Image (cartoon, rainbow, N blue to C red):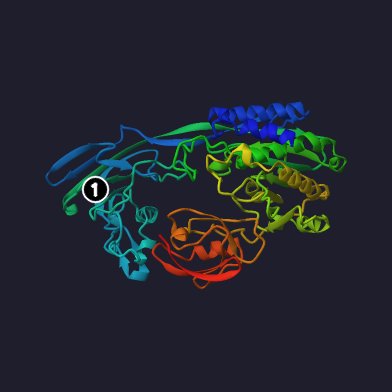
């Protein structure tokens, strides 16, 4: 516990400013982890060095040199960026077009409603700048089915399919929530310039020519994975034990559940995982049960930005990935619940080994319990290995109200609980067959992620092992709060959908849209209660 405390107190200190990938605090974190690995006698696993660097797009910024040109029957005007027009995230990084105008109305093709804004489109219209209105033909109806096809992404896809060489969105219906001009960095740009103008274009039939000059610069920053290896024999197979060391900084790039810009120290997320990984790096090389394996210990960066570091590691692995028997991922292992003593292992369906081994591990359930999920795809670094056909599990002590909040700090860490999780992990991975890995795909393979149009404003209790989904937190002012749901309520039904666990809750949630009103059945103190809930 002393070692856990040492690592977590440093990584979660204000000095590291939340360890946002590419920032000085994240580099300090990587350097600290590197020194610990050196102290334990590990060797650098990235061509004999410990640090594996990777670039990622930190920001996309539209240059003030971007311009909009509009010519109509009365003349022509140039407009400067930022006042009368902005570029959209889907805009090409550097592109320009000056062409005739095709008025595509709302830019919607929707067979179910018998609507097609391109019904008069001719092949000669391709290659033009398409003028497209925000919204849809039934803007006054918040429940209109047009809402499913009126998003900007859908309209861009439709316009590209019709051969647009540029797109200019406008807002004649005076809708709110217009594009802000803030460019998302993780959007794949199209090959054409795409802009939005706040100008009143009047009679669009009088427009003759539109020119868009888009100048977008991408600012890169550098993330730092840390790789340490203990190689007994290069011919032996490897176990990868990893955890991410980055966090979300001062919420510069979002991801926070707080509205402020305070330092998010991330003691549980994921200084706790790094502490556990490093402690195993210190102890496993001398553990007799692990002499049949080579060991790779990895601290990933960029996890909070989309598993960037683990994806890079797998694609640029210092060894042949065929030599990896399994991957063990620690992410948020520092907050074992003191009332139910329950940790979670995700991904046990990725190999037949996991369930067989778990049956042989004796547990004092008054002190420690395990919940499991089969799926290999989740919101942590084990996913990158699963997608490379490597059995991978994620150890997790459960969600909590301080997740992605400034309050995720050292004083809330349950150090004895961490010891229980580490001890169980050692028992779980000490007998993996050393000759050939046994990988299995899980149910979520080749499935697209569930799409949600609404949220309840709750945090599930992932450690709950009963029927239904227990609420660990209810956000003030959100749909669940307004319906009268409380922390520790157990949702058992939403509308016509039974809810037996978190996965079934997610499936049910995906069936609703903004404005829907449903009955939600909950258990509160053992009593079944039905609440009316409207999705905001």
Quarter-of-image position of residue 115: bottom left
Q: How crowded is mark 1: few (under 14 residues within 10 Å), some or many (20 or more)?
A: some
Q: Where is residue 232 in the image (x, y as percent from the top left)?
A: 83, 35
Quarter-of-image position of residue 288: top right
Please name whichever residue, 273 or 306, is drawn nearer the observer in this view of the structure: 273
Please name whichever residue, 226 or 119, is drawn nearer the observer in this view of the structure: 226
Q: Where is residue 181 in the image (x, y as percent from the top left)?
A: 34, 41
Please name whichever residue, 232 or 476, is drawn nearer the observer in this view of the structure: 476
Q: How many marks?
A: 1
**Residue 346 visible somewhere in the drawing:** no
* Left or right of 461, for residue 196: left
* Residue at the limit of the structure toward the right, as seen here: 288
Quadrant placement of the N terminus: top right
Quarter-of-image position of residue 347: bottom right
Please name whichever residue, 26 or 153, is drawn nearer the observer in this view of the structure: 26
In this rendering, is residue 90 above or below 513?
Answer: above
Q: Give the SS element for disc 1.
A: strand
Q: Which residue is drawn at 31% across and 35% down?
A: 66
In this rendering, is residue 120 above or below 382?
Answer: below
* Left or right of 128, for residue 8: right
Q: Position of residue 43 (x, y in %)?
A: 75, 29
In this rendering, is residue 166 above or below 445?
Answer: above
* Residue at the limit of the structure toward the left, as seen here: 74
* Left or right of 524, for residue 231: right
Quadrant placement of the C terminus: bottom left
Q: Where is residue 129 in the image (x, y as percent from the top left)?
A: 28, 48
**Residue 307 visible somewhere in the drawing:** yes
In this rendering, is residue 199 above or below 514?
Answer: above
Q: Which residue is drawn at 35% across and 59% down?
A: 150
Q: Mark 1 points at which residue?
A: 100
């Amino acid at each position: 516990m002393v070692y856990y405390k040492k690592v977590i107190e440093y990584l979660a200190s204000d000095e590291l400013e939340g360890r946002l990938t590419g920032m000085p605090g994240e580099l300090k974190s990587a350097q600290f982890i590197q020194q610990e690995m050196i102290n334990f006698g590990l060797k650098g696993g990235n061509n004999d060095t410990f640090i594996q660097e990777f670039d990622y797009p930190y920001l996309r910024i539209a240059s003030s040199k971007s311009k909009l040109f509009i010519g109509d029957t009365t003349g022509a005007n140039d407009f400067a960026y930022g006042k009368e027009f902005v570029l959209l995230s889907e805009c090409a990084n550097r592109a320009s077009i000056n062409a005739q105008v095709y008025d595509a109305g709302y830019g919607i093709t929707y067979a179910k409603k018998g609507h097609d804004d391109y019904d008069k489109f001719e092949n000669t219209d391709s290659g033009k700048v398409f003028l497209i209105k925000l919204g849809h033909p039934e803007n006054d109806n918040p429940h209109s089915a047009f809402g499913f096809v009126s998003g900007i992404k859908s309209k861009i896809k439709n316009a590209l399919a019709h051969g647009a060489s540029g797109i200019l969105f406008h807002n004649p219906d005076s809708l709110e929530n217009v594009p802000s001009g803030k460019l998302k960095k993780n959007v794949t740009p199209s090959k054409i310039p795409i802009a939005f103008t706040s100008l009143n274009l009047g009679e669009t039939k009088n427009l003759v020519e539109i020119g868009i000059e888009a100048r977008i610069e991408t600012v890169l920053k550098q993330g730092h994975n840390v790789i340490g290896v203990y190689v007994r024999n290069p011919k032996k197979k490897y176990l990868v034990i990893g955890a991410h060391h980055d966090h979300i900084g001062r919420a510069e790039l979002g991801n926070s559940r707080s509205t402020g810009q305070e330092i998010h120290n991330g003691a549980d997320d994921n200084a706790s995982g790094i502490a556990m990984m490093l402690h195993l790096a210190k102890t496993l090389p001398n553990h007799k049960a692990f002499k049949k394996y080579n060991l790779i210990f990895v601290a990933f960066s960029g996890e909070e930005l989309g598993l960037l570091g683990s994806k890079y590691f797998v694609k640029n692995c210092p060894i042949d990935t065929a030599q990896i028997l399994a991957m063990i991922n620690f992410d948020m292992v520092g907050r074992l619940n003191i009332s139910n003593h329950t940790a979670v292992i995700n991904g046990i369906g990725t190999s037949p080994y996991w369930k067989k081994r778990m049956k042989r591990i004796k547990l004092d359930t008054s002190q420690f319990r395990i919940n499991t999920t089969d799926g290999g795809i989740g919101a942590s670094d084990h996913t990158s290995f699963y997608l490379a056909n490597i059995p991978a599990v994620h150890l997790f002590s459960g969600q909590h109200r301080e997740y992605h909040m400034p309050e995720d700090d050292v004083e809330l860490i349950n150090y004895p609980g961490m010891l229980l999780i580490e001890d169980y992990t050692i028992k779980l991975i000490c007998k993996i067959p050393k000759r050939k890995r046994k990988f299995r795909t899980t149910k979520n393979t080749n499935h697209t992620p569930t799409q949600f149009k609404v949220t309840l404003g709750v945090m599930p209790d992932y450690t709950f092992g009963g029927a239904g989904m227990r609420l660990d937190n209810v956000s003030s002012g959100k749909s669940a709060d307004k319906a009268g749901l409380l922390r520790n309520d157990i949702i058992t039904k939403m509308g016509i959908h039974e809810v037996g666990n978190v996965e079934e809750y997610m499936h049910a949630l995906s069936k609703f849209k903004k404005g829907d009103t449903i009955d939600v059945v909950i258990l509160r103190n053992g009593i079944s209660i039905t609440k009316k809930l409207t999705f905001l």
